[in-house]
Image (tube, rainbow, N blue to C red):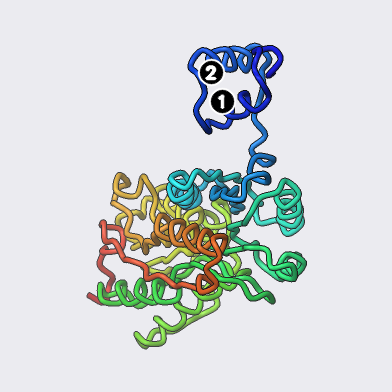
Amino acid sequence: MARAAGVSPMTASRVVNDRGNVHEEARKRVLAAVKELGYIRNSTAGALRSPTATSWTVGLILNDVGNDFSATLHRAVEDVARPRGSLVLTASTDDSHAHMAHLVDEFWSRQVDGIILAPPPGDQHYLEASIARDAKIVLVDRPAVGVPLPTVMSDGYAGVRDAVEHLARHGHRSIAYLGDVRSPAMRLRFDGYVAGMLAAELDVTPALALAGIETFDDARDAVTSLHALADPPTAIITGRNRTTLGAVRALHDLGMQHHTALIGFDDLDLAPDLDPGLTVVSQDPRRIGRLAAEMLFDELDGDTTATRSIILPTTLIPRGSGEISGPGR
C-alpha cells in the first residue's frame, strides 16, 4: 500500500491509524491506495503494538439476541463500549450448553478481551478453564452453577412474590404459575410464587404450580388445560416473556382475556397495546447491560474491586390485565 501511494511505510501507517502529522497530499494518496487495494486495518495487531491502547473487544453471548430483553441489554452494552472505542461481538446460544462452550472457545480464539454471557441452565464447568487463567467474565440475567463469577441480575424472587400479593389484593384466591426451574434465576421466580402464596395464606397445588413451562406453545396449551379444570384459576403469573405471549394467545382464543387476570414477568413492547393492557413485573435490561459492561471494562482497566454481584429490583407495572378483580373481591 505504501508503495502504491508513493510514501514510506511509516507515513502510510500514520494515515491508516490516524496518528501523527501527515502532509495533506500524502494523506490523499494513501487513502486512494487504501480504497483501490481494499486494504483493511488489522486492529488486533495495532493494539498489540501500542502500549497505550485503551479500547477493548468484548464478546456478548445471550440466549437469543432477537428477544426483546436481550436486544435491549445488547444495546446497553454497546452504549457503554462505543465511547471507549471498543467493539462488541454478539452471539446466541438458544440455551445450549454445547453451543455456549463452543462460543466461549471461539471468542477467546478470536482474541476478545472479555466476555459478558447469560449462562444456559445447569452446570457451567466449561468456564473453569477461563477462570483458571483469570479471564474476564461477567454474567447477566442468571448466576452460574458451580463457578464463582460476578453477576448482574434482577430480583425475580421478590418480583413474582409481589405479583402474587398484587393479585391477592384484587380478590384472587386461585392463582396459577407458568414457568420452569431449570436455571437458578427461574427457580427463584418459582420460589417467589410459593412464598407469595404462603404469605397470602393461599394453597400451592401441583395443578396450578406448573414448573415445566418454557415455550410459547407450552404456555398456550397449559392455559387451555387450566381452563378445562372443574375449578380453573382466576389469575395467572407467567415466568418469562415468551410464555407470557403464549398465555395471552390462549386467553384471547378462549375469550377469557377480560375474565382471567394475567401478570407476565418481563415487559414487552406490545404490552400497553394489548386488550387489556398487560400488567408485568418489569426488569431493567438496559441497566443490567450497562452495569455488566461497566463492571467488565473496570476489570479490564485493572480495577480489582470491580468483581462483585449486583441484584436489581423489579417494578410491577399495572396496565389492566393484572387488575381484573377476582371472585373474592
At which x and y percent is residue 282?
A: 37, 61
The answer to the question of whether label 1 and label 2 lie on touching residues, with beta carbons closer than 8 A, is: yes
Name the residue nearer the viewer: 140 or 307: 307
**Number of the label disc, if any, that sits on residue 46:** none
The amino acid beneath tag 1 is Val
Residue at 39 percent across and 81 percent down: it is 196
Name the residue nearer the viewer: 189 or 320: 189
Q: Mark 2 falls on what kind of element?
A: helix
Name the residue nearer the viewer: 214 or 170: 214
Q: Quadrant of the N terminus?
A: top right
At which x and y percent is residue 291?
A: 44, 62
Q: Which quadrant of the view contains residue 149?
A: bottom right
Residue at 50 percent across and 56 percent down: it is 243
Q: Earlier in the sequence, mark 1 or mark 2?
A: 1
Left or right side of 181 for 166: left
Left or right side of 160 for 12: right
Residue at 66 percent across and 18 percent down: it is 38
At which x and y percent is residue 144?
A: 63, 71
Residue linked to disc 2? 27
At which x and y percent is residue 75?
A: 45, 46
**Number of the label disc, if any, that sits on residue 15:** 1
Left or right side of 54 for 147: right
Q: How many marks?
A: 2
